[in-house]
Image: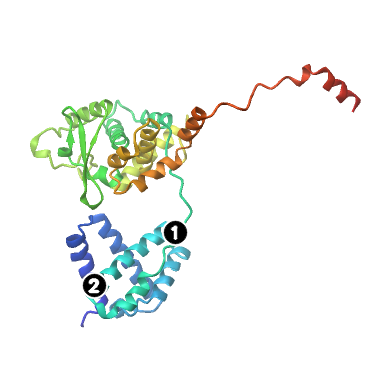
Amino acid sequence: MKPTDFAVHLTRFLSEYLPGHKNVSRNTISSYRDTFKLLIRYCQEKEGIAAENITMNTLSGGLITRFLEWLETERKCSISTRNQRLAAIHSFFRYAQCEDPSGLYHFQKVIAIPVKKAGKAVVEHLTPEAMQFLLSQPDKTTIRGRRDLTLMSVLYDTGARVQELIDLKVCDVILNTPAIIVLTGKGNKIRRVPIMKGTVQLLERYIYENRLDVNWKNEYPLFFNKQHSKLTKEGVSYIISKYVEQARLSSTLIPSRVRPHMFRHSKAMHLLQAGVNLIYIRDFLGHSDLKITEVYARTDTETKRQAIENAYPELINSSLPDWNEDQALLAWLSRL
């Protein structure tokens, strides 16, 4: 059976163009792949088109729009997820129009589908007191507790994405002064992040205790499970959720749900509140654009309040007189 033009373009897009020409990460390729798995499933279940019959002409602007509505209504995806799926489709059709200029008009109708406007999401983060309390939860007298404390401390101290954390190898930890951790971020971009004294001490003990300080273990994952494989995102979420539930039994500082990415948001907010310049925070987090980092400045209401208090005099006097001492008022109330 002769493959369709869609099958040819999609295979080359995922296996050659994205990794070879765009040099995107495995996670991005996986995300794009999942988008087209969903699109093929939609075509089969809702449009009655078998996978082997899908062509580039089949994927009209109308079909793609219906697919996006299906994601929202039936799969209950958020607007953000819908827009991510559309971004993957846009990228594919931009690639296709270069490979097959004869379909340029058709492809550009799909590329013209706009993203859906969504409300500004609030940057969820923990206060310094809440983060300190959460990090006090692991039991330091057990090996597992010390591992979990080290993991959460590294996640917070480096501001790492959870994928960057689980991809860490032993050789990425440099404890000589100045101590740093080498993170590999989106697009395989490498950045070196300084770590604080407390985290350095935890890492020294953790590496020694788990016998990771021998040369032939340099490529070992820094954090691993019982099978000595690197942790998964779900594994990290489970560890954090366990201590969140424990902390909430004795404190109202901790929200009911703490996702791993909130550690990254919390670090950024705490750096901003400490007066660190946004440009340094951008580099620390590995953002490609300062506009991405500015979301923390827009969210930081505490710093705004302090700036306003410092800039303007206190005009409202909160020390009001006691009405019980106003005899004229009391007499008037009696006659009322």
From the top left corner, tell me how far across and down residue 138 is, in percent: 34, 30
The quarter of the image holding the N terminus is: bottom left
Q: Determine the image quadrant of residue 8.
A: bottom left
Decide: is 63 above or below 177. Answer: below
Residue 155 is left or right of residue 68, and the answer is left
Depth order, front residue of 29/270: 270
From the top left corner, tell me how far across and down residue 232 is, in percent: 28, 47
| Residue of label 1 | 79
Q: Give the residue displayed 89% in from the left and 23% down from the top.
A: 334
Which amino acid type is shown beneath numbered disc 2? Cys
Q: Residues within 10 Å of mark 1 (few under 14, many from 20)?
A: some
Which amino acid type is shown beneath numbered disc 1? Ile
Is residue 180 visible to the viewer in this orientation of the structure? yes
Q: Which mark is residue 98?
A: 2
Decide: is 249 above or below 26. Answer: above
- Helix, strand, or loop for circle 2? helix
| Number of marks | 2
Q: How is the image coloured?
A: rainbow
Q: Which mark is residue 55?
A: none
Depth order, front residue of 205/325: 325
Q: Give the residue displayed 62% in from the left and 27% down from the top.
A: 316
Decide: is 253 above or below 319. Answer: below
How far separated are the C-alphas under marks 2 and 1? 29 Å
Q: Give the residue displayed 65% in from the left and 21% down from the top.
A: 319
